[in-house]
Image (spheres, helix red, strand yellow):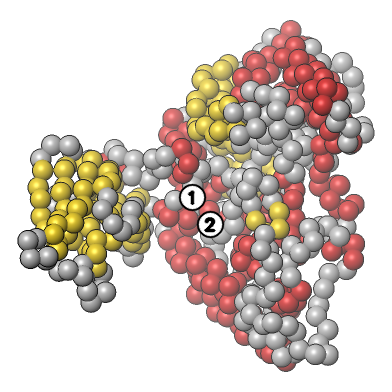
Amino acid sequence: MGRPDSVCERIAAGGVWETRERTGSHLWEVCLFHITGEGGETAWACSVIADMGMTSTRTAWDNPGAQCHSLLVESNTWFDERRFQMEHYDRSALLVVPESGVAQPIPLPGSESWSTAADGGQPSRPRTNGTMNTLLPMDAPAHDWYRFVLSFPPHLVRDYAQRFDLGPDSRVLDPFCGTGTTLVEAKKLGVPSCGLEAVALSRFAASTKVNWTPEPDGLLRHAELVAEKARASLDADGIPDKPMDSAPERVELRSLPPPTAKLLFKNSISALPLHKVLVLRDTLEGEHNPAFVDHERLALARILPTEVGNLRFGPEVGVGKVKRDTAVVSAWLARIRGMCEDLRLLQQLEATPAAAFDGDARMVGPHIESASIDAVITSPPYPNEKDYSRTVRLESVLLGYLNDRADLQTMKRGLLRSNTRGVYSNDDDDVWVEDDAEVERIAAEIEARRVELGKTSGFERMYHRVTKLYFGGMARHFVSLSRVLRPGARLAYVVGDQASYLRVMIRTGQILSKIAERAGYEVESVDLFRTRYATATREQLREEVLVLRWPGAVSRSTRTMMRPRVQTAAVD
């Protein structure tokens, strides 16, 4: 058994209050009240109702200075290192603070609950809509080495892998693999997998997260050597690896070349942390070890956006509070230590193939063997104004994947057109949906709304066009994808409604289901994943899982219907 991780959550605090909390199979109602005796003495009392039935009353203690502080729910989680299975233990307690000021928990009788994944329960599943997309502690190994902020959760992959009955003889594809959530989780489940990703930094992250071969102790020793040399280089300039108010006089800080620096948001990273990052990066290059370099570079990518840089996320990427300086080498080394702990667990699993390829999801055929895929689990970009390349821009620049605007444009040309910042004059994916009445209706409504509101910017003028390019690109994807699917293959697409274009509602899942049907797929279901409230439209936006089945060969008429009328939009 592994080391248990404990988490205590404070539910309420201070004064006279009551609360309800579910622990295991019990629903607790806890009422706290203050008693004053005839002589002026005081005491706290607690009324506990389990499952709204049996009632018991107990006095916390008779101490005038006692304060009832909060209700705690303690959750202990163990990892079964052999089966990578979670065991879960819950307990509720009342936290009280006597005059001494030392808090003491008073357990609530009968609140203990024990479960494992094998018991048929789902202790790992988030319980609320707001946490459905949260990375759970049990999922952290490999997934948390680097995670795209808009990634879907690993438990979703587990759910559909089980529903599709995937096993060691299956092969799953994620054509929009991002940083590898599907690939990592499939590897943990023992299911061979592959993915396509056009963004180099994301593809590097996905490839590294499914590489569990580095020897942990060797990786840590090498990283400690790199850290020692990087610190020595910094110390030589009078710059310690801890926050400083300013650089020493006569020290010229390292910086990026102007064409590269222009790719970043202003104040994405402050001058002193940037200098430390470049020193660490150069030290890594000087101490290059092919067995460890990818994991060491990924750990650097992991700390860049918020630990070292000044970025914030949600819903868009932007610059938050600007840090004058921060530690870099120690933060990086801490991530390496976490990786090493994870590798010791992951290396006990069966070796399962997983790979991420450089590819455009609209042209699947050239990268994957024909009729080799049993399932697809993926989340394509949504039709909105999120420029997904910005989310990983800082890491892409500092790790050398983007050096100038030409590099950025080359990368964007390999992406599904989902926002106006990635549209080019010769794009023609819209011909794939020129006969789709619903897509044409939405595009026309967006353009009419723009004219009505007097919106004249270049980006706003392209809203209606990018909508058609998006759904055309997805139609192109479905046709190209069919060539690599085995008959009976099943597919799960995490998609979301959008109202980013002048508040015109786009029901993405509904439209894609019709497009997929026209391409010869069978729609098995559209499952609700979660909802989110859109303040602009005051409507509930659905995030759904579109579940499809590929029956095999389709009729010539279906192929003709999906084939565009111009030759420039090739399938592969």
Is 227 positioned to the left or the right of 423 in the image? left
Q: Quadrant of the C terminus?
A: top right
Q: Quadrant of residue 13?
A: bottom left
Q: Quadrant of residue 457?
A: top right
Question: Residue 384: x and y, percent?
Answer: 71, 35
Q: Which residue is mark 2?
A: 144
Q: Amino acid at mark 2?
A: Asp
* Dot 1 and dot 2 residues touching (CB under 8 Å): yes
Q: Amino acid at mark 1?
A: Leu
Front residue of 209/21: it is 21
Front residue of 347/23: it is 23
Q: Is residue 261 above or below residue 491?
A: below
Comparing marks 1 and 2, which lies closer to the viewer?
1
Q: Is residue 385 above or below residue 98?
A: above
- Disc number at residue 135? 1
- The number of discs equals 2
